[in-house]
Amino acid sequence: MEGVVPPRSGVWSDVVGQPDAVRVLAAAAQAASSQVRGERSPAGAMTHSWLFTGPPGSGRSVAARAFAAALQCERTGPDEVPGCGDCSACRTVFAGTHADVRLVVPEGLSISVAEMRSLVQAAARRPTTGEWRVVLIEDSDRLTEGAANALLKAVEEPPDRTVFLLCAPSDHPEDVSVTIRSRCRVVRLRTPSADAIAEVLRERDGVEPETAEWAASVCGGHIGRARRLATDEQARDRRAAVLRIPLGMTRFADVFRAATGVVATAESEATAANEERNEAEKEELKTAMGAGGTGKGTASATRSANAALKELEKRQKSRTTRSQRDALDLALVDLAGFYRDVLVTRSGARTPLNHPDCDEQVSRAATEWTSESTLRRLEAVLQCREALSQNVKPIIAVEALAATLHRG
C-alpha cells in the first residue's frame, strides 16, 4: 500500500508539491476503505489520529481536507484510490457541509476548552451518512491548555470509526503537547517549489504565465499568498510598501511614519476583511432572536438578544485582532526576507533570494550596511514577531522595531 501513487486528480490535485505525503495518505485512505468492506489491510496504514505539520503555506489544512474527503469518498473499489473529487461526499467535505466531518477553523486567538468539550462530545457519535466521523482542527497550536487536555482524553480512547486530523506548524511542544503528539501519526509537509506553485496558478487559477512565475518566486513557498499576489493588486501594493521601508529609513522621523503606516495598514486590512461579515452576522442574530417583535415576552427576548449580541461582538473583536496580527506578521515576514537577502548577497552565496524582484535594492543595502548591522535588523524583526505573539501593543512593538531598523 505504501507504494501506491495516487493520480494527480480528484482531491489530491489540491495538495501541491507533496508527493510523499499524498502517497502515505492515499495508502491510508485505501486501507480504511478495505476495513469498511471487511477486507484485510496493511498493518499501520490507517490510524485514528493524524498530525499534519509544515511551514505556513505548505498546505497543511488542504492535505487534511483531502484526506477527510478520501475517507468519505463514495468511490471505494478495491483497485481504486479513494478521493475522486466528483462524488457528493468529496464535494461536501471541501464545501464544509458534510454531516460527518467537523471542521474547526479558529478565527480568534485561541480554541477554548468549552469549544473542545463540545467537539469531543460530537465526535463520540457514530457517523450518519459516511463511513467515518472525521474531526479536523486547523491551527491546533491555538488550543488552550484546558482544550488540549479535553482533546487528549478523546485521542487516548477514540470512539470507533472516528478519526482526528490536527494541523500545526510543527510537532514541537510549543505547538502541540507531547502527550497529544505521541498518539498521532505525523505527516510532515515541506515548502512547495516555485515551479509547482506557478503550475497551479496557471492551470487551476488561470493566471498569466509571467505573473504566475513572479508570484511563485516571491511568495516564500506560501501557495495562498502566491494566489493573492497574482490576483489582488492591493496585496501587491501592500507588499511593495513594506519592502520600501528598509531603504526609506533615512531620518529619525521616518521611524514613526513607518511604524504608523504598517500598523494602520494592518488595522484597515483586518477591518475590511471582517466588516461585511460582522454586519451580516449581527443581522442574522437579530432576526433569529426576534428583533422588532411586539407583544408578550418581547422584553425578555430583547434582553436575551442583547446578551447574545454582546457575546457575538466579543468573538468578532477577537477575530479582527487575529486578522490584524496575521497582517502584521505577514509584513514582518517580508521584512525579514529582505534582510536575509542582504546577508545572502554580502556573503556571495548562490542562493535564491526571497525577493528577487528587489535585487537592486538588496544590492544597494548590501554595499551600505555591514553584515553585523544587517543581522541586528533581522533579529529586531524576529523579536517584534515574538513581542506581538506575547500581546504587546502593536504600535509599541513596531515603533521599537522601526527605531532599530533606522539605527542598524
Image (cartoon, grey):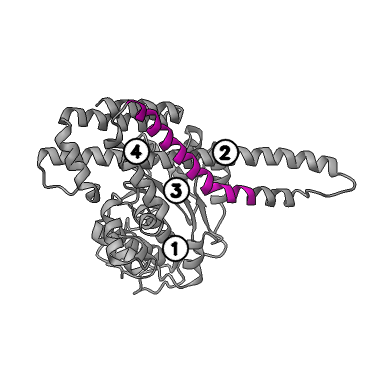
Q: CA distance from mark 1 to mark 3?
A: 15 Å
| Span colored in magenta | 252-280
The residue lying toward the viewer, choosing from 357 and 294, is 357
Residue tagged by mark 4? 332
Q: Is residue 49 visible?
A: no
Residue tagged by mark 1? 69
Marks 3 and 2 close (CB-CB < 8 Å)? no
Q: Answer with mark 4 or mark 1, whichever residue precedes in sequence.
A: 1
Instruction: Identify which amino acid the numbered label 3 is placed on.
Output: Glu
The residue lying toward the viewer, choosing from 346 and 195, is 346
Q: CA distance from mark 4 to mark 1?
A: 35 Å
Position of 291 with respect to 183 (left or right) is right
Under circle 4, the secondary element is helix
Marks 4 and 2 close (CB-CB < 8 Å)? no
| Position of residue 214 measured from the top left corner of the image (x, y, whole percent) | 27, 57
Instruction: Identify which amino acid the numbered label 4 is placed on.
Output: Leu
Residue at the image position 44 percent from the left and 48 percent from the top: 138
Q: CA distance from mark 3 to mark 2?
A: 20 Å
Is 274 one of the magenta-colored residues? yes
Q: CA distance from mark 3 to mark 4?
A: 23 Å
| Circle number at residue 232 | none
